[in-house]
Amino acid sequence: MSRLPITKTPKPYAGGAFIRSESGRTFPLRDASGAFFANIPQCTRKDLRNAVEAAAKAGPGWARRTAYNRGQILYRLGEMLEGRRQEMADTLVRFGDEAAAAAHEVDTCIDRLVYYAGWADKYEQVLGNVNPVASPHFNFTVTEPMGVIGVIAPDAPSLLGLISLVAPIIVSGNTVVAHVSEKSAYPAILFGEMLATSDLPGGVVNLLSGLRKELVPTFATHTHLRGLSAVANADERKAIRLGAAESVKRVHFADASTAGWFEDSAQSLYRIRDFLEFKTTWHPIGA
Amino acid sequence: MPSLAAKKSTRTPARSGRPAPELIFGDLWEFDPAPETADPKLKSRYDLFIDGQFVAPKSGRYFDTINPANERKLAEIALAGRDDVDAAYQAAQRAFDTTWGRMPGRERAKYIFRIARLLQDRAREFAVAETLDGGKPIKESRDFDVPMTAAHFFYHAGWADKLEYVAPGHRVAPLGVVGQVIPWNFPLLMLAWKIAPALAMGNTVVLKPAETTSITALKLAEILQDAELPPGVVNFVSGAGETGAAVMSHPTPVKIAFTGSTEVGKIIMRSLAGTEKKMTMELGGKAANVVFDDAPIDQAVEGIVNGIFFNQGHVCCAGSRLLVHEPIADLVLAKLKNRLKVLRVGDPMDKNTDIGAINSKPQLQKIQELVESGVKDGAEMFQPACRLPSKGYYFRPTIFSGVTMSHRIAREEIFGPVLSMLTFRTVDEAIEKANNTAYGLSAGVWTDKGSRILKMSTELKAGVVWANTYNKFDPTSPFGGYKESGFGREGGRQGLLDYAKLI
Amino acid sequence: MVAKSPAIAFRRLFDEVGTVDQIGVEERVAKFTTRSIKKASKIWGLKKAVSMVDLTTLEGKDTPGKVASLCQKALQPHDDPGIPTVAAVCVYPSMVRHARKHVADSAVKVASVATAFPSGQAPLKTRLGEVRAAVQDGADEIDMVINRGAFLAGDFSRVEDEIAAVVEACGVAALKVILEVSELETFDNIRAASFVAMGVLREGDFIKTSTGKTSLNATLGNNQVMLEAIRDFYLDTGIAIGMKPAGGIRTAKQALQFLIAVKETLGDAWLTNERYRFGASSLLNDLLRQLEKEKSGSYQAPYYFSEAAESY
């Protein structure tokens, strides 16, 4: 008699741990063939709140890491994904991708992580500057991370979309609470396992699986989220803008088509800039 | 200086029995009035400036603008309705499509340089107009607002043909037509902050000046005509809230830039939900000015005074929360009181006036109401015994000590000459108190210790940090807030990019 | 107590008196220059400035004759009787007896620079002898220089002891302690040196900016730093020390700016020549010109005034 394999209970990575929803709810996930795959935690507003708290707690420490160190950790994340490249590609195939497309997506994800890892100790040199003010003061403008940023990831490409949104946000010292694709939550959950083993401090990236329509409004209105990077339809965009107004939240919508996420143009210094604050400091020059 | 003093007092027993020494800031040498006499060349009626022409509002309606220093009417200002705003946007779109948006940068630059120069030529006239309309001391409009306005045009002019350096890795293009709404505290300067970068980048503009301070914008329109700026590149639509709403809600602008209160900023953000319009928001503040025991105290006192009493405290980045290291709190307060005694409050047109008129009656009432709440909450109030003019809107410079973080005067933006003083004991406590606000526009820190300056500058959640100085501005220096103080920057390379599209 | 070890003394003194931000001071004093003083307040200020002038001649070529004419000018700066006499004439020790004779027992005081002015580079004994001799010859006031070398080396006790010795040698004469600010260089040093001096001065004594013999003399900035030191010392001890900016103040406009600094920093009680002086030679004539202009309404040529600095 052949051995019955045990299955993995999928739990998203949030607050440095693999969680179930506080609500105890799950939703069934089926693979491309329609077969039952697993029960996915259906995270709620409260899970989001908890994740934001974890992200806020992790933020100062993450932001204080040296840029060099953040770069290495992002690179390490790439290494983790490279090491489990086949497993991730197989997973994408199971949820409907062609083998070649799946491999391409995973490769692009790795390259994207490497791209942003390299920016960690450079973006400041390009975006900040000293200002020649017309008075005896030394005046300089530097960037700072904003704080906790929400991410609402696309359904396709679910993994590349998620990574493309998250990496430029965290590279500067922000922390992230991300809603992962509802339709293909599992690749993101698998990615969470790599986050957990990548030296990334717990709480820097928090992934929440769940129903989009339940969570998007809370992402919009949670005032501790200082920014939101989202792939959203027109109705969602309006709701997000309305909610964001209450706390003057910075919102950026990504417009890329599915194919667009694979382009080089989907990665940019200016995606890092979207979630930076500029701080200008003045000091007199005297003896 | 305890030991020197201690030694001295033992050597000179004369001190004992004398009353505590005090300084006398009396009227031994009173200054005669020194009124600025330059002619502001005001018209009795100002029309809208649309498509390069002064035009009457379609409704035929005008409103009065008054001098807050004496409550006298200065002029009538055209009230722009929806139709007028629409005409302005049509002109702006036409200008973008046919002239300004296609013009080589070096040509745009020369127009903007011209504006700077023409304003410098008429600087005194504009300063007087600014003071009459807004109530700020003539020395501020003369030495700060107008020269800084010209400097903003001059700085941004030079960018117009160097835009390939604004965003490394990208070429940039103008956004198109921009709608802008500005406040009454720095009418001309806020106009320059909005218009100069927009024009340098190749955008065209519809701008609404504040209801109580429209005159200098409409005078600047004369300069735009003299500069032969192509019609429609800049359009001014004066009016109140309804006009502002029309400017914000019109379908034409691809970007809205607003400076004003956080409350109105949120309303605008909500109203733009569902559109793809870009935004820059420069909103309110409740800045902490943090003074450590090792600070250069007299310069800190001067910085505190600049921080809160500049422009009657009508400054979004005003240092309205003074956080003083506990051991020196009494000393700082005593020095502040002596400094306040020599501030001259009164006629804004007098060259010696330090604190002018509050911009409007509603603003004065708001200040009075918040000050009453401070007294009621149990904070200790100090006001110097200065004489105030009998007519006009004036408020004495005011310091509250013994303020706690829960008092309204420590949390709400007063936008007046009112300082709330709190104390702290450790660096961490200072940081925590300074950041305990939804605002994040600016902050000050005073200490002689270099590494502490950098630590504070890093930890203070504010877009501008003034270290051992306060309320400094420069066109090269980006300005703008964290958190609910808004987003986007004005000034410098960063500010310019907020008017560009990356290609 | 001033410590013996220069290192400890240095740090202790600067910690005690606190630090000064140069740019902040310059911004503060720039505000004095934008004050606009008109009409009666201008006349009041100009006359007050006249009454505060230490009319000075400190030239190697000074003669009894020149001092006599200086004294004449001091006693009657102008034929307008409404214009006060100056505060003092300031001369070298060898000229004290001539000056004494001319000003007699008028309100005009005789001040003398002593202590190996302007360098101070003579043995203490010699310097004290010079002070005593000047007082003996009739000086009401002595302007001494501090030992800048000792100050910059951190030897504050020596600076202090020397001032104390001069105080003693002065007897009833008032003492003005010249810090020679250009050699102290920084506002921090100027503030610290002010405190070292004030620590051993008596009510009615002065601190003074400069000898007038170096490239940089009184400025609104160093004047301000010293006024603030006087203010802090007064509020702490109750002892009112006077202030004398010297050198570089040539115009009435400048003098009014210095007086505005006094009014806004130390208040009304210092708007008197018992507590504030101008060490100057050419200032007086410009004050008189401006007073005449206020009276007549016409601008005045310099050669209408005796002892004019410029004859062009």
Image (cartoon, coloured by chain):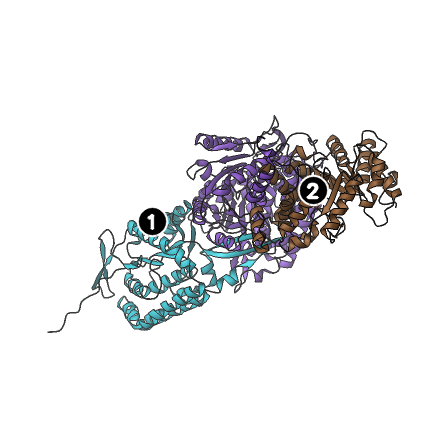
Chain colours: A cyan, B purple, C brown
Residue neighbourhood size for the residue with mark 2, other residues' Cα within 10 Å, grouped as few (<14), some (14–19), many (≥20): some
- Mark 1 — residue? A218
Q: Nearer the viewer, residue C50 or C162?
A: C162
Circle nearer the viewer, 1 or 2:
2
Residue C234 drawn at (x, y percent): 61, 38
Q: Write the residue at 49% across / 57% down.
A: A143
Q: Is residue C79 left or right of residue B266?
A: right
Q: Is residue A245 visible?
A: yes
Coordinates of residue B224 in the picture (x, y in percent): 65, 47
Q: Amino acid at mark 2?
A: Glu
Pick the front one: A21 or C182: C182
Q: Disc 2 sits on a residue from what chain?
A: C
Residue C168's tag is 2
The disc numbered 1 marks a residue on which chain?
A: A
Q: Quadrant of residue C282?
A: top right
Q: Secondary structure at mark 1?
A: helix
Q: Residue furthest top?
A: B390
Q: Nearer the viewer, residue B148 or C197?
A: C197
Dot 1, how many residues are within 10 Å of its Cα: few (below 14), some (14-19), or many (20+)? Answer: some
* Discs 1 and 2 share one subunit: no
Q: Is residue B220 visible?
A: no
Tell me: B173 left or right of C92: left
Q: Position of residue B452 (x, y in %)?
A: 50, 53
Q: Give the vertical position of A70 relative to B469 (above or below).
A: below
Give amino acid for label 1: Thr
Residue C213 sits above or below residue A39 on the image: above
SS of the residue under disc 2: helix
Q: x and y percent of residue C64 in the render?
A: 87, 43
Mark 1 to mark 2 CA distance (whole Å): 81 Å
